[in-house]
Amino acid sequence: MRSLLAWSRIVRASRRTMATGTKKEVIGIAQVNPNVIKAQYAVRGPILDTVNAVEKQLQQKDHGLSFSEVVKVNIGNPQALKQKPITFSRQVLAACAYNELSEKDVFPSDVVDRARMILNSCEGHSMGAYSDSKGIKVVRQHVVEFLEARDKHPADTEKIFMSNGASEGIRMVLELIATGEGKTRSGVMIPIPQYPLYTASLQELGMPAVPYYLDEDNGWKLDANDLYRNVKAARETCNPVMLVVINPGNPTGQILTEQNMKEIIKFCADENLVLLADEVYQENIYAPEKSFVSFKKALRDMGPDYENFQLISCHSTSKGFYGECGQRGGYLEVIGFPDDVMGQLLKLASVKLCPAVAGQIIADTIVKPPHVGGPSRDLYFKEKAAILDSLAERAHLVSKSLNEIEGVSCNPVEGSMYAFPRITMPEKAITAAKKVGLAPDALFCKEMVEQKGICTVPGSGFGQKEGTFHFRMTILPPLEQLQRIVVDIKDFHKEFSTRYA
């Protein structure tokens, strides 16, 4: 009996030893993919460590801070900043999720009809089942109808891939073209400044990023001559195969002219590059003299000489007037690719099984609004107009207010959801930042969280011309709150400049 007890104690002690970590780790940091370690995503980067520390301090009774909450204007997350969802979209989603509500006279008739239409196209008539890997057939058909109405050119359901937001679709495309080694490695031309999804994804895939610079002094215009110079230089070290364009711009907020777009298309044709058009902000247009033109329309209007041009464009449910970031809806339109390549893209989509069905449903309500005469139509367009009109007012307020700050300049926010002001940094601030291992604008953003409770993103996280410093902020908070934020930014910038003068 004693020997059995002794053996039992030995076994328990051995298990405790293993649990406390004396056993060698199978995966430690040395075994992690080095490309993952190197990848950075500034929007949710180190600045959030400061935010977490400040929010923890705010929980203390005598926290000693001059503010009561941290306002996160670092990310385009509309509903986190009190934007209300579109009623029609949420009602259709609710009716699909709990179809019994459709029988209880809870929703308008056009909501019930749309929910039935979507569910009838789903396996088992349930949104809980996997959809086709490309997405629900009727939703893709509605995307085609939306594209044809927008561009006045044909579209094809087989060229549409629904995705979990635009981001997953973009990463899938990058994965598709990640080939070669050394000088043959596929490179991707990206704008600077750019949305950090691109640099992070390329780093993870081990693909070279080929930067081209937007001209801040010329309204963030894209210079076609600069593109030719950059692609020529890049071919010394890699094989550029794709050009990314973000229109309207993120973080820059500019809208490309149709002429500039056609110059870009010609460049891609001349240099044998695929064009990836990130168009997720196409509904966010605030400059009355500007309008959104898709790259698909610009391309097709250029005629038969560009018939075989390869273009991938994307859209998302996260932006626009809907702001359904958490639902993860979006789509790709892929044109000009041979069938065997489309088969490989479908394989990548199939590995993920299917996009989130909830996101597909939200996407459906965006590309196909309530029909004329339907009971939901008036409210839908009233909500849409109210959100976009308010965003336009806020866009003007932010750029005007930032330009009134000495040492700050900001191009007009023509579109998207962001301002990207340029800030003058005192030499002492630059030196202080180096001492703590931060970029100068990262020091600026860190101290603004600590002293004013305003969370922005340093321009260094997006890329910027050497010797310049910026930060990105959204225009999404409610107007009254945004008015207070820009005053706080002004006060902080003055104090920061004085302290490091």
Image (cartoon, rainbow, N blue to C red):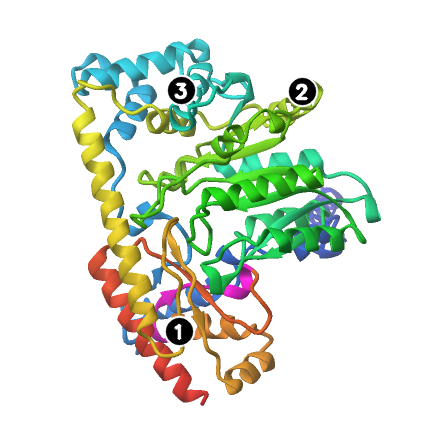
At a point 31% along the width and 62% down the height, the residue shown is 398
Q: Earlier in the sequence, mark 3 or mark 2?
A: 3
For badge 1, the amino acid type reads Val
Residue 383 visible in this rendered orientation of the protein? yes
For badge 3, the amino acid type reads Glu
Estimate how packed mark 2 is, as few (under 14), some (14 to 19) or many (20 or more) residues with alpha carbons within 10 Å.
few
Q: Secondary structure at mark 3?
A: helix
Q: Is residue 501 magenta?
A: no
* Number of numbered discs overlaid on the protein picture: 3
Whether residues under marks 3 and 2 lie with C-beta atoms below 8 angstroms apart, the answer is: no
Q: Position of residue 45 (x, y in %)?
A: 52, 59
The dot on residue 343 is 2
Q: Secondary structure at mark 2?
A: helix
For badge 2, the amino acid type reads Gly
Name the residue nearer the viewer: 441 or 29.
441
Q: For this view, does 190 lie left or right of residue 425?
A: right
Q: For this view, does 340 lie left or right of residue 77?
A: right
Q: Earlier in the sequence, mark 3 or mark 1?
A: 3
Q: Position of residue 15 (x, y in %)?
A: 69, 48
Identify residue for label 1. Answer: 408
Q: Position of residue 122 (x, y in %)?
A: 43, 13
Position of residue 139 relative to residue 489, above or below, is: above
Q: Which residues are magenta?
A: 451-462
Identify residue for label 3. Answer: 145
